[in-house]
């Protein structure tokens, strides 16, 4: 039974990502992307990462996709004409992309999980996934969390500088 | 028990679909969306390795990835709006000049 559900989520994730990237209307692409993120969150639940599944739903589906939609509405969300959808030299680019794909698949299918840490499934069930992540995040990676705060502050300043429109510039 | 290779091949395929589309598409918005698809694949590989290696650092790294992706997408979309205000187009092949005429 679990194999059937997993196979459904695998196939639908691949199909949805292809559908999201071949839409002509960008708003439809963003909505397919929302569906993709919900399916990826369910695959996180297969991997016992329930906190990360919730973060995926809240941050990606709640914040980033809304940002995409606002940008589309600011741009007017016009469709590009059909004959100009793909770049020139598409054959060469497809060849490069498919060869990188083959390399990635060959490398990924030969990875073996040799290392085992101390966070076994039994330990995480005892402590709780969220608490285990939080303890790791704020003890071992506390400096990284501080740097992450700076990394999130700088785009805020950069975005407000980039979106600044001078009065004498509107001619 | 689902094998680790299934998750890793799924993550690799999602990443590759985004990568191929990043190369060939002309619409700048679709290019940003394919970047998001690639990040979803990377996060999936991190979480799968974290589960099968019994180490929670992979999930912590995935949280960092999500946060940095949020910042980078914000900057990218505001650059997109600035470029659109200048050129009135979202075509990647018209991105070759940075100067304002």
Image (cartoon, rainbow, N blue to C red):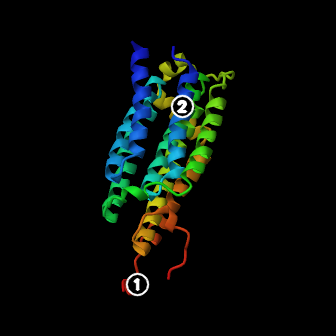
Q: Secondary structure at mark 2?
A: helix
Residue B59 found in image quarter: top right
Question: Which residue is rendered at x = 49% and y = 19% of the image?
Answer: A126
Residue A156 left/right relative to A138:
left
Figure check: A62 above or below B45: below
Quarter containing the N terminus of chain A: top left
Residue A49: give x, y in percent of width and height. Answer: 47, 28
Figure check: B47 above or below A68: above
Question: Which residue is rendered at x = 39% and y = 71% of the image?
Answer: B88
Question: Which residue is rendered at x = 43% and y = 39% of the image?
Answer: A17
Q: Residues within 10 Å of mark 1 (few under 14, many from 20)?
A: few
Quarter containing the C terminus of chain A: bottom left
Residue A70 left/right relative to B66:
left
Give the numbered dot on residue A36.
Answer: none
Q: Is residue A41 visible?
A: no
Q: How many marks?
A: 2
Figure check: B59 above or below B100: above
Q: Which residue is disc 1 drawn over?
A: A169
Mark 1 or 2: the one toward you = 1
Residue B42 left/right relative to A51:
right
Residue A143: give x, y in percent of width and height. Answer: 61, 47
CA gap, disc 1 and disc 2: 48 Å
Q: Which residue is disc 2 drawn over?
A: B47
Q: Secondary structure at mark 1?
A: helix
Residue A112: give x, y in percent of width and height. Answer: 66, 22
Chain letter of disc 1 in the image: A
Chain letter of disc 2 in the image: B
Q: Is residue A118 visible?
A: yes
Q: Residues within 10 Å of mark 2 (few under 14, many from 20)?
A: many
Q: Mark 1 touching mark 2, by CB under 8 A?
A: no
Question: Which residue is rendered at x = 52% and y = 62% of the image?
Answer: A154
**Of the pair B24 and A56, the residue shown nearer to us:** B24
């Amino acid at each position: 039974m679990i194999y059937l559900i997993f196979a459904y989520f695998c196939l639908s994730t691949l199909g949805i990502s292809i559908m999201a990237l071949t839409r002509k209307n960008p708003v439809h692409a963003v909505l397919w992307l929302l569906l993709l993120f919900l399916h990826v969150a369910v695959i996180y639940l297969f991997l016992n990462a329930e906190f990360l599944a919730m973060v995926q739903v809240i941050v990606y589906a709640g914040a980033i996709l809304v940002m995409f939609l606002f940008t589309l509405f600011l741009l007017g969300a016009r469709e590009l004409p059909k004959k100009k959808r793909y770049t020139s030299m598409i054959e060469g680019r497809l060849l490069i992309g498919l060869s990188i794909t083959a390399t990635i698949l060959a490398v990924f299918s030969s990875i073996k999980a040799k290392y085992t840490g101390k966070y076994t499934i039994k330990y995480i069930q005892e402590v709780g996934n969220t608490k285990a992540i939080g303890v790791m995040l704020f003890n071992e990676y506390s400096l990284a969390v501080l740097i992450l705060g700076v990394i999130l502050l700088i785009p805020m300043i950069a975005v407000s500088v980039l979106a600044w429109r001078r009065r004498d510039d509107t001619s | 028990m689902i094998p680790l290779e299934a998750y890793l091949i799924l993550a690799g395929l999602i990443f590759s679909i985004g990568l191929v589309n990043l190369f060939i598409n002309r619409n700048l918005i679709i290019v940003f969306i394919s970047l998001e698809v690639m990040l979803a694949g990377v996060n999936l590989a991190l979480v799968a390795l974290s589960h099968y290696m019994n180490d929670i650092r992979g999930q912590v790294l995935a949280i960092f990835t999500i946060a940095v992706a949020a910042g980078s997408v914000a900057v990218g979309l505001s650059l997109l709006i600035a470029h659109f205000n200048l050129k009135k187009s979202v075509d990647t092949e018209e991105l070759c000049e940075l100067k304002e005429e």
